[in-house]
Image (cartoon, rainbow, N blue to C red):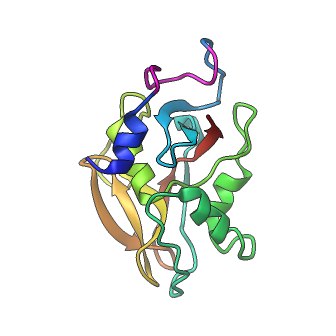
Amino acid sequence: MSSLQKFHRRTNGKAAGKLIGSAAPVAGAGWYLGTAGDGTSYMYVAPKSTESWQQYGSYGTFRGITNQLDGLINTNSLNAYAVGVHPGANYVKSLTTGGYNTWYLPAKGELTTMSSNKTATPFSISNGLASLYLSSTEYNATHVWVLNSNNDTWGNNYKGGGGGNYLVRAVRRTTI
């Protein structure tokens, strides 16, 4: 288990699951996963109903967006480019659900943590593309890290440009 997963599993006495700051769940606000790897914030996962098919974008260009632990940094870096260049990052940045608009595309490590908590954060489980989730972590100029939720394995798949549509599941953080 990675150190990021250990941080995320430390839930400060709260069970992982649908909990947003109070005993009553807030519709559309997401799933509480515990403390984020930075030690100063909580991590939440957007509801499954907000998933969207998206491409990473910038096929053929290496942006250097390789942070595996902080998707917020990655998403902000991707969104610094023109609108539409990075569809997955643009989608989560514009997402508003449960009264929150601070969602971002998870980094590779954050997506691993989400997948390891499948009871709290349901994923699409099927044979084929419906099980591939996009991370914000770039692999190279033509590929991005993608998680297969059927078997929790990682692949480096096309960013776009002739293929590369993946499910996007947004996350957000709040200060402890």
8 relative position to 3: left or right? right
Residue 101 in the image: x percent, y percent?
74, 44
Can I make out residue 123 in this image?
Answer: no
Q: Which stretch did the figure color magenta?
A: 12-22
On screen, residue 55 above or below 4? below
96 relative position to 128: left or right? right
Q: Nearer the viewer, residue 65 or 8?
A: 8
Q: At x 32% / y 40%, what residue is drawn?
A: 116
On screen, residue 19 above or below 113? above
Please tell me whether residue 2 belongs to the stretch shown in magenta: no
Place residue 68 in its image quadrant. bottom left
Place residue 26 in its image quadrant. top right
Residue 122 in the image: x percent, y percent?
42, 34
On screen, residue 169 above or below 97? below
On screen, residue 144 above or below 123? below
Place residue 75 in its image quadrant. bottom right
- State the predominant SS element of the stretch in magenta: loop
Residue 12 in the image: x percent, y percent?
46, 25
Can I make out residue 108 in this image?
Answer: yes
Residue 100 in the image: x percent, y percent?
73, 38
Q: Nearer the viewer, residue 17 or 49?
A: 17
